[in-house]
Image (cartoon, rainbow, N blue to C red):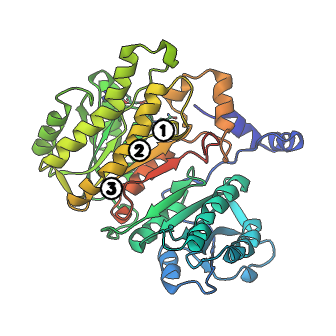
Amino acid sequence: MSDRYLELVNSSVGSAVASRVGLPRPAKLRRFADDAPILPGPALLGSTAGRVPAALKKLVTSAGVEVLDSIDKLSTGERVAAAVLDARSIATPGDLAALRAFLAPAVKALAPSGRVIVLGVPADGADVRVDATRQALDGIVRSLAKELRAGATANLLWVADDASLGAALRFFLSGRSAYVDGQPLLLGPGVAPAPKDWTRPLTGKTALVTGAARGIGAAIAGVLARDGANVIAADLTQAGEALAKVANRIGGTALHLDVAAADAPQRLIDHLGAQTSGLDILVHNAGITRDKLMANMKPEQWDSVIAVNLESQLTINAALLASDQLNDQSRTVSLSSTTGFSGNRGQTNYGATKAGVIGLVRSSAAAFAAHGNGTINAVAPGFIDTDMTAKMPLATREVARRLSSLQQAGLPVDVAEAVSWLASPGAGGVTGQVLRVCGQNLVGA
Ligand code: NAI
């Protein structure tokens, strides 16, 4: 469903009117395009330690990005497409002044859909002064993300280990992360090989996406295929026609599978055994809503949501881990929701499952790591334009669309890009994490 308001305020008349009366002015976001570079202009690099580490510079330049090491080298009127600040050296509150010194002029020079990325070290409990200073980065980045306009974003990478730093920088600098804003993400140790071809990082991988007949699931199937994976698109038998169309469009195969059926795990394992050489990527996307206030909630409304959105993921994961069908360095990604953090009126059942998924990925990381260095993460979409949200009353939907720092709903492809990145070999250092794709949704942000 197109966002007519966004189109209007991006016309010359609409833009002038919106600016005069102070209405939100959502920008058209820079998204992935086949022929586009990772970044459409130079990235300004800085470090709170003074000198930018050569290794960091190399990671950025090897992504094909031009690097500027001083804002003074910018000619008048020239913009930077990104500002990357390595703040891993900070240790006392006084050191935080270096962030202001770098970011204030950088933000002024930031191009539309620009990227601010701050690198920090996660607090480790060794020294309270150091920990308090490190944690301050979270408040700076979240606040800055709320100030940025014109489709620009700010995100924070907690670098406990740099195994996945290169892949993470490519994702966060590129149009793939268009709707990820104001988010911290922990990069830990892991097996994170660089793909042979960064443009098709999933080449040779077998992926299964549940609920793939429409909406976010169909977009995930499409992006995984675009990125090189052989995709099995799974959905209910009644979604058969739509599912077949998705599978044909992406050059994948279709599988009729009700994830909540008692025999679903075994049917899945049998299918993998017969048709594939094992599973590399599993995306638990199938989900339903049965909204009711708690006072009016019927047992079947409660039970069906728990069964589809949470119980199915637990049983399928357990069966796969116990089988010989999950390959080494597997990637599992579960769909949570910002409702899992913030709650939502009328969604106690749904909120239970989406918070449950967060618990599931945190708790499963060790088991997947023990199974050939696999990872498991969740993606928590905010307000995404799909059939699910099209059911909302018009006025509620219009308000909900503007309630994020990017002042617009996300698209299914935005969620799909995050899933595909977490599913890639280079993301091996990211596990047990939840990445919100919500445009910095102001509800519970
Ligand atoms: P949708 O309703 O458009 O599509 C869901 C798909 O899952 C459908 O094709 C449906 O047939 C399938 N499905 C339902 N029950 C199934 C079952 N038992 N077995 C197999 N397939 C089943 O939903 P949408 O919006 O694309 O959402 C996808 C996921 O993203 C869900 O987990 C949802 O909770 C989550 N999400 C969506 C948000 C949004 O704004 N649309 C926001 C946050 C999370």
Task: Name the residue tied to disc 2.
Answer: 358
Residue 125 image point, x, y percent: 48, 68
- In which quarter of the view is residue 50 placed? bottom right
Q: Is residue 334 rendered to the left or right of residue 103?
A: left
Going 65% across and 41% down the picture, which residue do you hit? 408
Q: Amino acid at mark 2?
A: Ile
Q: Going 56% across and 55% down the picture, which residue do you hit?
A: 183
Query: Looking at the picture, how far across and down is residue 185, in whole percent?
Result: 49, 59
Marking on residue 228: 3
Looking at the image, is mark 1 or mark 2 earlier in the sequence? 1
Say which quadrant the N terminus sits in.
top right
Depicted 368 relative to depicted 99: above or below: above
Assess disc 1: are there few (<14), some (14-19) or many (≥20) residues with their C-alpha within 10 Å of its C-alpha: many
Mark closer to the chain start, 3 or 1 = 3
Tags 1 and 2 touching, CB below 8 Å: yes
| Category of crowding for the residue at label 2, using alpha-carbon neighbours closer than 10 angstroms: few (below 14), some (14–19), many (at least 20) | many
The mark closer to the camera, 3 or 1, is: 1
Q: Residue at x 48, y 38 (%)?
A: 340
Q: Nearer the viewer, mark 3 or mark 2?
A: 2
Q: Nearer the viewer, residue 15 or 402?
A: 402
In the foreground, 119 or 256 = 119
* Residue 179 or residue 130, whichever sits in front: 130
Q: Secondary structure at mark 3?
A: loop
In the image, which disc is placed on residue 340? 1
**In the rendered structure, are the residues bearing label 3 and label 1 in contact, judged by CB atoms less than 8 Å apart?**
no
Residue nearest the observer in this picture, 422 or 190: 190
